[in-house]
């Protein structure tokens, strides 16, 4: 097998706060291969942005990686200095579209001025060459090439977002990290952005780490997925396996909390309760207070991520009842005609 592009291996990240240390990411592991679209899902506060910021060296000053490794093309980067990150990784290898992407544009500079500034620092290309590259990316994200000389305020919100994506892409990074890239946009604009991401994938063979609290977006556009709950990866696997055969109760309840084009009539579920405080290591399942299938065992020790018995070699879940919980859940659900619907939609999609 070829070397993975990015490996996050047992990553733990803590923040120092006035009330003590909080663990925002706990022993998280996943792999992103060359050209792969990987989705990181989970409700607000579960540690998604912290994971992303750890990769690109963008943690807030009170945060630190306390254990684990991050490898990029096999090289450990978790201890890289700002200088190393800037010279070796940022923009050229790994581009970051932050959660508040639209605010990341400088209102006083045209998009092409911003691109030339970034490109001059990170490449040897001339200004003219950088502008040509930006034009190419504008056309890929569906913006007119002539508009590279516009100021951010001359664009609508959706167009600003696409301009940020074009800037992230124009030095042709191998990995794009997009943190909730469409949250601020309306549904039609979201669809357009994702259509463009699909085109980018086809044309540039870029890998994507897509962070979103909306797992239906990941099921539509990614190949692999990790679902985080309370700083931990609850389930990880190929999208096909996690969609068809979810094993962690949080994963399938979370999935049921979002609309699904394949089951348009299904009622959306609500996950009651809250995850535990993210303090020091907890000795029980973090989902225990919210889980309808919890047993004594779940309160007495913490389940580890373990392989799921199915055809997906990377599929893991951290639940003591992972081989039975989904079946229990399905047997308790009211039956619908959705199975026929799924078959019909799947055929149409092809
Ligand atoms: N700079 C910080 N200082 C203290 N706590 C933080 C800081 N940044 C994030 N957190 C906390 O870390 C946890 C994970 O946050 P985050 O990674 O932003 O989650 P997500 O992106 O999934 O919403 C949350 O409890 C959040 O409040
Ligand atoms: S380990 Fe227990 S409490 Fe945790 S998700 Fe599984 S069944 Fe629920
Ligand atoms: Mg976030």
Image (tube, rainbow, N blue to C red):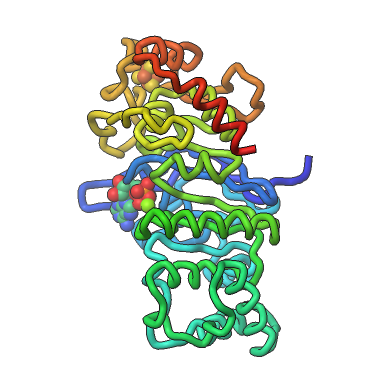
For the image shown, how many numbered marks are present on the structure?
0
Residue 18 falls left or right of residue 46? left
Q: Is residue 86 above or below residue 117?
A: above
Please report the residue visible at 69 percent of the width from the left and 55 percent of the height from the top: 202
Residue 343 at x, y percent in the picture: 56, 25
On the picture, is 313 further left or further right than 262?
right
Q: Nearer the viewer, residue 348 or 127?
A: 348
* Residue at the image point whose x is 58% and y is 74% from the top: 138
Q: Nearer the viewer, residue 193 or 224?
A: 193
The residue furthest right is 1
Q: Is residue 199 above or below residue 45?
A: below
Q: Nearer the viewer, residue 270 or 158?
A: 158
Which x, y percent locates residue 154? 40, 82
Q: Residue at x 61, y 80 (%)?
A: 119
State the image coordinates of residue 142 (x, y, percent, origin top left): 56, 69
Residue 320 visible in rendering: no
Q: Residue furthest left?
A: 19
Q: Nearer the viewer, residue 119 or 143?
A: 143
Residue 324 place in picture, x, y as percent: 46, 11
Task: Decide: is 163 above or below 37.
Answer: below
**Residue sitting at 51 percent across and 50 percent down?**
210
**Is residue 193 in view?**
yes
Quadrant occupied by the C terminus:
top right
As displayed, is residue 292 above or below residue 315?
above
Q: Quadrant of residue 326?
A: top left
Q: Quadrant of the N terminus?
A: top right
């Amino acid at each position: 097998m070829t070397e993975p592009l990015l490996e996050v291996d047992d990553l733990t990240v803590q923040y120092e706060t006035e009330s003590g240390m909080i663990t925002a990411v706990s022993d998280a592991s996943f792999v992103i291969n060359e050209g792969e679209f990987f989705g990181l899902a989970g409700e607000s506060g579960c540690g998604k942005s912290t994971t992303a910021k750890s990769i690109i060296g963008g943690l807030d000053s009170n945060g630190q990686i306390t254990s684990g490794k991050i490898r990029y093309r096999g090289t450990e980067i978790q201890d890289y200095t700002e200088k190393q990150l800037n010279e070796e990784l940022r923009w050229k290898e790994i581009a970051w579209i932050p959660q508040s992407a639209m605010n990341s544009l400088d209102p006083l500079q045209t998009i092409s001025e911003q691109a030339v500034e970034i490109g001059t620092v990170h490449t040897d290309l001339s200004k003219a060459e950088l502008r040509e590259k930006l034009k190419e990316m504008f056309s890929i994200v569906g913006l007119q090439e002539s508009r590279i000389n516009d100021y951010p305020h001359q664009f609508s919100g959706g167009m600003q977002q696409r301009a940020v994506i074009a800037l992230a892409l124009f030095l042709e990074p191998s990995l794009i990290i997009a943190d909730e890239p469409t949250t601020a946009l309306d549904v039609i604009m979201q669809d357009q952005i994702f259509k463009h991401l699909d085109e980018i994938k086809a044309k540039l063979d870029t890998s994507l780490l897509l962070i979103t609290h909306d797992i239906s977006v990941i099921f539509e556009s990614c190949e692999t997925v990790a679902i985080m709950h309370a700083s931990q990866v609850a389930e990880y696997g190929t999208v096909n396996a996690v969609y068809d055969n979810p094993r962690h109760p949080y994963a399938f309840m979370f999935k049921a909390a979002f609309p699904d084009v394949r089951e348009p009539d299904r009622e959306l579920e609500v996950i009651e309760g809250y995850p535990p405080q993210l303090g020091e290591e907890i000795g029980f399942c973090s989902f225990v207070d919210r889980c309808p299938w919890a047993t004594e065992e779940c309160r007495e020790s913490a389940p580890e991520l373990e392989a799921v018995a199915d055809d997906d070699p990377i599929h893991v879940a951290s639940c003591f009842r992972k081989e039975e919980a989904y079946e229990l859940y399905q047997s308790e659900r009211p039956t619908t005609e959705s199975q026929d619907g799924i078959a019909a939609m799947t055929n149409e999609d092809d």
